[in-house]
Amino acid sequence: MDDRDPRLSRPTLGVLTTLLGSPRDELSGAEIGKEANIGAGTLYPVLARLEKAGWLTSRWETEDPHALGRPRRRYYRVTPLGATKAKAALRQFEPAIRRLAWES
């Protein structure tokens, strides 16, 4: 990892694991937060940092939220750079994660 890479906190790893493990290409912020069990106050700064680092891209949905009766959603997708960097980071943490799982 270089100095421009985002800090790999527990919430950041949760976001990356959720996106990489999803069968869909992109997920809304709300879906990521629910799956990773991360509150909005933590989630959206993490998503912004990952997007700024080039690990994610995002887009606003094209459907009319008023017609759907809900707020507009923003969808996030892992970039090729993000996938490479995230997988390398997760491999680095894998032994520690296994130890924690074993001790639980």
Image (cartoon, rainbow, N blue to C red):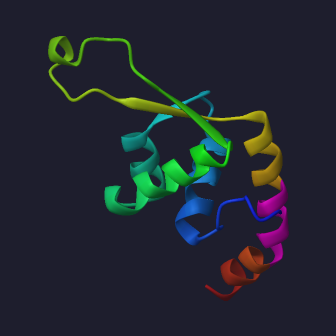
x then y, percent, for residue 58: 52, 31
Residue placed at 34% from the left, 29% from the top?
Answer: 73
Query: In the picture provided, is 41 more to the left or to the right than 101?
Result: left
x then y, percent, for residue 31: 41, 41
Q: Where is residue 41, by image quadrant?
A: bottom left
For the magenta stretch, what is the residue range?
88-95
Residue placed at 78% from the left, 71% from the top?
Answer: 93
Q: Foreground residue, 101 or 61?
A: 61
x then y, percent, for residue 27: 50, 34
Query: In the picture provided, is 59 more to the left or to the right than 78?
Result: left
Q: Quadrant of the C terminus?
A: bottom right
Q: Foreground residue, 21 or 92?
A: 92
Query: Quick check: 92 above or below 102?
Result: above
Residue placed at 83% from the left, 45% from the top?
Answer: 84
Q: Quadrant of the N terminus?
A: bottom right
Query: In the picture provided, is 30 more to the left or to the right than 80?
Result: left
Q: Is residue 94 magenta?
A: yes
Residue placed at 64% from the left, 67% from the top?
Answer: 7
